[in-house]
Amino acid sequence: MQISRRRFVIAAASLASTTLLPTESRADATAVSETDPTAQALGYKTDATRVDKAKYPKYVAGQTCTNCQLYQGKPGAPSGPCPIYGGKLVDSKGWCSAYVKKT
C-alpha cells in the first residue's frame, strides 16, 4: 500500500506536534468534532458508515478508527486518542482519510 506524500506530511506533523508539545491528560481530552478544520480536511466521520464513498474512494467497508494503526484507544472503548488530531478523542466507529490499516 502506498501512502501519498500529503498523507505522510500530515501524519508526520501531527505526530511531531504531539511529541514536542505538552498534552492534556487523557481524562481531560476532548472529542474531535466533524466540524473541526483538521477533521473536515481529512473527511472525519464519527460513524464510518456515513463516509462519502464517491469523495473518498479508498474507503472500504469495515475500516474504522478501532482498526487504524494511529488509534490509541483501548480495545472495546467507545473512543480513544488519535495523534492526527493532537490527542483528541475520536469515535472508535469513526473514520478519516488518514486511516492506516493496523498490522
Image: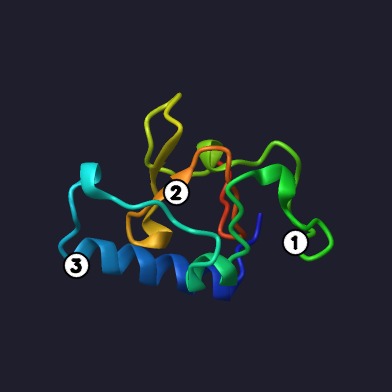
Mark pair 3, 1: CA separation = 31 Å
Task: Where is residue 85? Give x, y as percent.
Answer: 40, 61
Residue at 15% x, 62% y: name it: 22
Q: Which residue is labeled 3 in the image?
A: 20
> Which residue is at the front of the view, 13 or 79?
79
Circle 3 SS class? helix
**Mark 3 or mark 1, which is nearer to you?**
1
> Which residue is at the front of the view, 83 or 9?
83
Task: Where is residue 10? Give x, y as percent.
Answer: 47, 71
Q: Which residue is labeled 1 in the image?
A: 56
Residue at 80% x, 59% y: name it: 57
Task: Please name the amino acid that badge 3 sits on.
Answer: Leu
Q: Which mark is first along the chain, 1 or 3?
A: 3
Q: Which residue is labeled 2 in the image?
A: 70
Mark pair 2, 3: CA separation = 17 Å
Task: Please name the amino acid that badge 2 sits on.
Answer: Leu
Q: Which mark is first along the chain, 2 or 1?
A: 1
The reply, left or right, for residue 7 in relation to residue 18 is right
Q: Which mark is first along the chain, 3 or 2?
A: 3
Task: Where is residue 58? Give x, y as percent.
Answer: 75, 56
